[in-house]
Image (tube, rainbow, N blue to C red):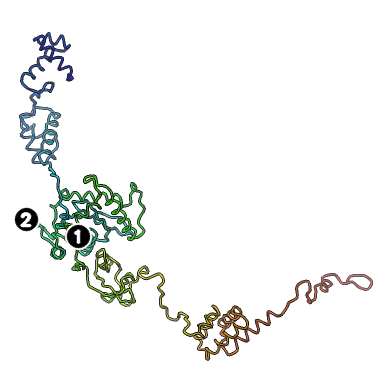
Amino acid sequence: MKSDGEIMEILEAYDSTGSYRAAAELAGCSHHTVKAHVTARAQGRPVGVPVRRDRVTDEFMDKITELVARSGGRIRADKVHERLLGLGYEGSERSTRRAVAHAKAIHERAGRRVHRPWVAEPGLWLQYDYGDGPVVGGVKTVLFIAWLAFSRFRIVIPLRDKTLASVFMVLDRTFRLIGGIPTYVLTDNEKTVTTMHIAGVPVRNRDTVSFAKYYGTTVLTCQPADPASKGGVERSVQIAKADLVPTATNLRNEYASFADLEAACQAFMSEINEKEHRVTKRCPIDLIGQEQERMHPVPDRAHTIAFGLSRKVPVNTPMVAFESGQYSVPHALLGSEVFVRVHGVAEAEQIIIVAAGRDGVREVARHGRARPGSPKIDDEHFPTDATQKVPGVYAVTANSPDEEAFLMIGHGAHEWLREAAAAGTSRMRQKMGQAVALSRLHGRERVDEVLGTAAAYGRFGTGDVASLLAHRVADQGSRSAGEDASLAQGTVGWQAMSSPSTTADGGEL
């Protein structure tokens, strides 16, 4: 194929000579080439573009196009070739393959969906979807991702399941995080939103309709199997999963607890909403104010249609009763209202407890089914300084100056009090007063040790403490001889027994 410069030289040579052969000699090419370019210029066709020649498949292109359309562009070229042979086709399989590829390209272009840019208005659209979350404690979690269309503000909240109550809970929390309720909420055709389709029309879940009416919004669903209609949140799901789910590419460690996953989602939201968006060239956190001006306020009380039965937490015990069982809740909820429901069946049955706070409704506890008389208790729900009441173990506390003076002696005094009380000792207050008087004469440390000895050996009689103290003082005044000044008889006299005896004349016995 000639270059553009060579073609211009050929045409210039022809214009100068007016002869195909003379121009060919000047340009160094065939006179047929000169004629082809000159003819194309005279007919107004692009110069240098190859002219399409007739092909053996031209007579059968209608049939090829029909077969490709009927199969949705999936038919193989060898199958088309077999059909064409029965119609009298004499071309090669290579020609058929080339014609089928051309027909498939036309079919694909004809059915390709053309997206029109969506110009979103502030406060109008909120989209949400779900993504597979990481495994925490052997249980797979769910990531709830919401996306405001105008500001591109994103919400990422981890869930333990996608039940109706969890969806309502996380939507209420989302509304409070973004500071208002948009006009429309768009999502997939989950069973929590759409129960069925009749003639292509989605039938809404009645609980969802009640929820939307309470918050003053409209819940819409996209076309089935058409994720492109909510492409913004679909992309947000991909980004959130790539960052939050531990993989070999992001080098994130496994989450030790569900609280760690919540903290990671909060950090991800802060980071991505404070970063400049590539489309708007502004940070979503800076545009959320324009959204809030158009959205209506969130009700003070959350809609509790699917949260379960209401229960009041006692003011001194973080436990709630539900279906003949007791379950613990965080001690910060003392005196507040919570909602309890059952999720799952058989061995997977769980008791879920949710509560409303400033930032919306959230799950506060999840337990297995408790049997009557055997409460389900989570140690983390109680404060670290909480003491467990154990029968027989009493806290020793002074209630009078005399008791305080006795207990100030030391640990031995505490043990003597517990053991003497358990033994039913009489006149304990008088004996405690005597111990205080002795501590002033002989010192607290000495009397404290004696009280500990009396408690260990059950010496609770009158004068026992004074007797033990006198014996201890007497032992401290005695002295013992050392090895160098010992009065014990030595072993020199025993040596004769080990040597042989002799007679008077010197013979051995």
Measured as percent of width and height from the top left, residue 264 is found at: 32, 55
Frontmost residue, 296 versus 356:
296
Residue 101 visible? The answer is yes
Measured as percent of width and height from the top left, residue 57 is found at: 8, 29
Q: Which residue is mark 1?
A: 180
The residue that appears at 15% across and 9% down in the rendered structure is: 25
Residue 79 visible? The answer is no
Looking at the picture, which amino acid does disc 1 mark?
Gly
Q: Left or right? Give the position of 70 relative to 262.
A: left
Measured as percent of width and height from the top left, residue 196 is found at: 12, 59
Q: Which residue is mark 2?
A: 199
Please identify the quarter of the rendering in which residue 77 is found.
top left
Q: Left or right? Give the position of 27 relative to 385.
A: left
Q: Residues within 10 Å of mark 2 (few under 14, many from 20)?
A: few
Q: Secondary structure at mark 2?
A: loop
In the picture, the quarter occupied by the C terminus is: bottom right
The residue that appears at 48% across and 85% down in the rendered structure is: 400
Q: Residues within 10 Å of mark 1 (few under 14, many from 20)?
A: many
